[in-house]
Image (spheres, rainbow, N blue to C red):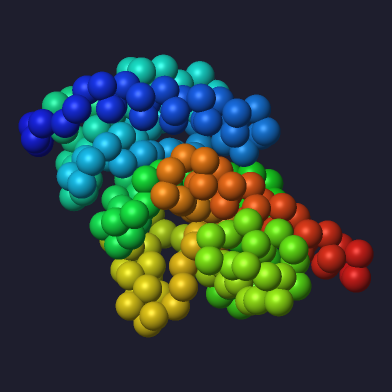
Amino acid sequence: MNSLPYDNAVLAERALAIADNARELAALGWTPATSSNFSMRLDPRHVAVTVSGRDKGKLGADDIMVVDLENRPVATSARPSAETALHTQVYRRFPAVGAVLHTHSRAQSVASRLFAKAGNVRFEGWELQKAISGHHTHESVLDLPVFPNTQEMSELVSRVDAWLDAGKPLHGYLIDGHGIYAWGVDMAEARRHLEAFEFLLNCELDLRRLSA
């Protein structure tokens, strides 16, 4: 167990933000059973993340723990989510990111299966693409990759690294049969990105239903 120091006041603030947002996302039905996980950066070396197996609609201070950027628990014997490595990867690759959200809405899960063979969902012409940072017009292309699912987090980390190392933009991603990861410089931007992707995925699914 790592014992590097962190600011307890910052942890309390981040834990409250995680719990509040998790409760709202659970109310939308995006965190069924005990699925999904959420995190926020505490400082350059530490992340606050949800403890494994907790009901995301009922999180309290004891349901949030601290890990370092190598996924090691800090000053706790609690067990982090198995997918914590996907959170810390985002924080390592994007130093400006302050929050990472992972949910399992029905639309996210269905789209992850529908677009798995293609390897990505391509959004073009939707006004709400402008909700994603760096996109300023509907006349743009926004790719949301779909990575194969695996219980080996190191394999998923490697796939995400390969995407980024190829120089491809990454604002979020789906995992086949699973759900979505989205992030932002703070919780507000992460929520905006998550909600925008949810809306866009629903639009793409509706188009396919209507054109069938």
The total number of labels drawn is: 0
Please tell me in which quadrant of the rendered image residue 4 appears. top left
State the residue in front, 113 or 37: 37
Vertical comparison of 173 with 119: above or below: above
Q: Residue at x 18, y 45 (%)?
A: 45
Residue drawn at x 46%, y 73% as measured from the top left = 169
Q: Position of residue 8 (x, y in %)?
A: 22, 22
Question: In what quadrant of the picture does the N terminus appear?
Answer: top left
Q: Quadrant of residue 40?
A: top left
Could you say where residue 6 lies in the image, as x and y percent from the top left? 16, 31
Q: Position of residue 162 (x, y in %)?
A: 35, 75
Quadrant of res 81: top left
Q: Residue at x 53, y 31 (%)?
A: 21
Q: Is residue 12 left or right of residue 163?
A: left
Q: Residue furthest front?
A: 136
Residue 23 percent coordinates (x, y) = 56, 25
The residue positioned 55% from the left and 43% from the top of the image is 191
| Residue placed most toward the observer, 120 or 178 | 120
Q: Is residue 35 left or right of residue 212?
A: left
194 shown above or below 125: above
In the rendered image, the residue lying farthest to the bottom is 166
